[in-house]
Amino acid sequence: MEPNKAQSLFPVAEIQASRTKNLYPNDLQRQKEKVIFVMGSTGSGKSKLAIYLASKFQGEVINSDKIQVHKGLDIVTNKVTEEEMNGVPHHLIGILEPETEFTVSDFCEQTSLAMDSILKRGNVPIIAGGSNRYIEALVDNETLEFRNKYDCCILWVQVSLSVLKKYVYERVDQMVEAGLVDEVRSVFKPDGDYSKGILRSIGVPELDAYFRAEAAGYEDEEILDKLLEEGINMMKSNTYDLACRQFEKINRLRFEKGWNIHLIDATGVFLKRGVQREHEWKNGVAWPSVNIIRSFLYGDNTNVMDKDN
């Protein structure tokens, strides 16, 4: 599938026409462009939903994960693959050298440029990722006048933390099986700075003691295995801690800052397996999200589930 030619529920002309309905107060005849945000804790399925929505609404995805913006460590950072992108154009993913800093200001500037480019093509920007502090800085950016320029629809893919914990622990094991240890070994430096660039990724500093023991020539397999196990367990714990912080951050945006956020409860998805999990995702996550976005873009309140059933 060619970029920018993803399947759409509505023609581009209708997307453009719908934008004329969103005028500024006092009949200034200025229209707001529309942008979609997909938020959620790590492992909740933000990227999958963003890609699905992009395929349905002529969208392009802008990455808002401050780690995934760097090249390398694709397993550790859980970057979406070309196959998973399903022909949907992606921006700000894997574009910076590993040690390059990517500040909040950089994110706001680069995202603004990407949005302008997407909108000029008549497509819909869909911003997805776990760096909620970056998203907050973008939306509240007075210099960019973000709130004056854009009409936002924010989806929160919410998963019960007790359920998500089991999943993220399993996912770390899957990442290890996929070659995570060798991937991190390839970037290990005894003098590496874990406060900069991609080396901040969960999975890199946690394995430092193990790689130092390797580099020092330890031959005791029992000690090495113990260090590796401790590192992996630390990865699991730190990943879950990150998920909890992200959950709390989004709640703060809802209740303290008054952001209008649509909750999409994906807990049921993580309680299923195989075909049942995909069926639950379609019914509990995909279709409710499509209904919200269709109403946001076009004012169409028809329930897609009613049409399909």
Image: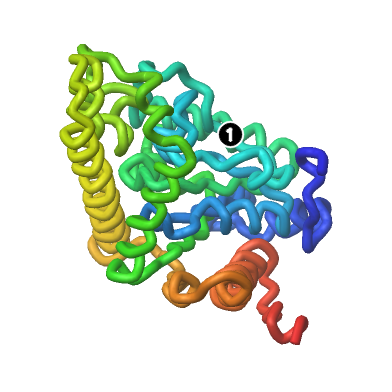
Q: Residue at x 58, y 70 (%)?
A: 274
Left or right for 296, reference 177: right
Residue at left offset 30%, top offset 67%: 161
Q: Quadrant of residue 204?
A: top left
Question: Residue at position x 65%, y 32% from top?
Answer: 117
Query: Which of the two residues, 233 or 46, is positioned nearer the viewer here?
Result: 233
User: Taking the image as drawn, is residue 227 in sight?
Assistant: yes
Residue 257 visible in the picture: no
Q: Specify the quadrant that holds the C terminus.
A: bottom right
Q: How is the image coloured?
A: rainbow
From the top left corner, tell me how far across and down residue 180 is, in percent. 41, 36
Task: Point out residue 32 in the picture as x, y percentages from the top left corner.
Answer: 59, 50
Q: Secondary structure at mark 1?
A: strand
Q: Residue under circle 1? A: 91
Nearest the camera: 37 or 23? 37
In percent of width and height, residue 130 lies at 39, 47
- Taking the image as shown, residue 21 lies to the left or right of residue 247, namely right
Q: Nearer the viewer, residue 27 or 39?
A: 39
User: In this rendering, would 185 be left or right of 31?
Assistant: left
